[in-house]
């Protein structure tokens, strides 16, 4: 448990937002596996979370856990022509639209067609909750990023 105390102390010193997930994961995994956590470590964890919430609200910081997918790669097209559509997919994810219609309108507007007359598909590589996933859907199909 000494390592957990060190992590908490480093995070408190540097206010690194990404380390918060590691702290919470360590506390939750220790609790779920019934690992012994001494009272000092538990109190330090609660103190850290309370201090961070006060800091976040005072500074106007918006804090959000990564419960949405992280897009690694997204390609739309057919035949030998595929366009990178990561920006468009990431925009939809930020808007909490995880059920995506695969068509030209979604990725570029009315005049967009990466390869006219060729059947197209969308392939997305993403990770969510620590699992890496791949999904593919044909044109006029749907992809769920859950």
Image: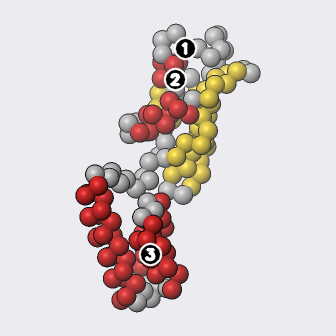
Residue depicted at x 55% and y 14%: 112
Would you say 98 lies left or right of 79 here?
left
| Mark 1 surroundings: few (<14), some (14-19) or many (≥20) residues within 10 A | few
Q: Position of residue 47 (x, y in %)?
A: 31, 76
- Residue to which mark 2 is pinned: 107
Indicate the quadrant where residue 50 lies: bottom left
Where disc 3 sits, the SS reads helix
Residue depicted at x 45% and y 34%: 91
Would you say 58 lies left or right of 88 here?
left
| Mark 3 surroundings: few (<14), some (14-19) or many (≥20) residues within 10 A | many
Along the line of sight, the residue nearer the viewer: 46 or 101: 46
Along the line of sight, the residue nearer the viewer: 45 or 80: 45
Identity of the residue furthest to the right in this view: 80
- Residue to which mark 1 is pinned: 112
Q: Is 3 situated above or below 19?
A: below
- Residue to which mark 3 is pinned: 8
Q: Position of residue 12 (x, y in %)?
A: 41, 71
Would you say 16 lies left or right of 86 here?
left
Q: Is residue 136 visible?
A: no
CA gap between label 2 and label 3 equals: 43 Å
Rendered image: mark on residue 63: none
Q: Nearer the viewer, mark 1 or mark 3?
A: 3
Nearest to N terminus: mark 2 or mark 1: 2
Q: Position of residue 46 (x, y in %)?
A: 32, 76
Nearest to N terminus: mark 1 or mark 3: 3
Q: Is 105 situated above or below 35?
A: above
Do the residues bearing badges 2 and 1 touch, measured as CB atoms within 8 Å? yes
Q: Position of residue 111 (x, y in %)?
A: 52, 10
């Amino acid at each position: 448990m000494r390592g957990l105390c060190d992590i908490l102390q480093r995070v408190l010193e540097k206010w690194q937002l990404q380390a918060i997930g590691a702290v919470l994961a360590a506390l939750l995994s220790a609790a779920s596996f019934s690992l012994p956590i001494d009272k000092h470590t538990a109190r330090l964890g609660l103190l850290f979370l309370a201090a961070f919430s006060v800091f976040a609200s005072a500074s106007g910081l918006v804090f959000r856990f990564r419960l949405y997918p992280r897009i690694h790669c997204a390609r739309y097209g057919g035949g030998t022509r595929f366009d990178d559509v990561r920006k468009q997919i990431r925009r939809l994810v930020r808007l909490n639209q995880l059920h995506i219609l695969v068509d030209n309108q979604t990725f570029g507007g009315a005049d967009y067609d990466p390869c006219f007359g060729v059947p197209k598909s969308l392939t997305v590589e993403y990770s969510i909750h620590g699992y890496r996933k791949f999904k593919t859907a044909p044109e006029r199909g749907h992809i769920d990023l859950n």
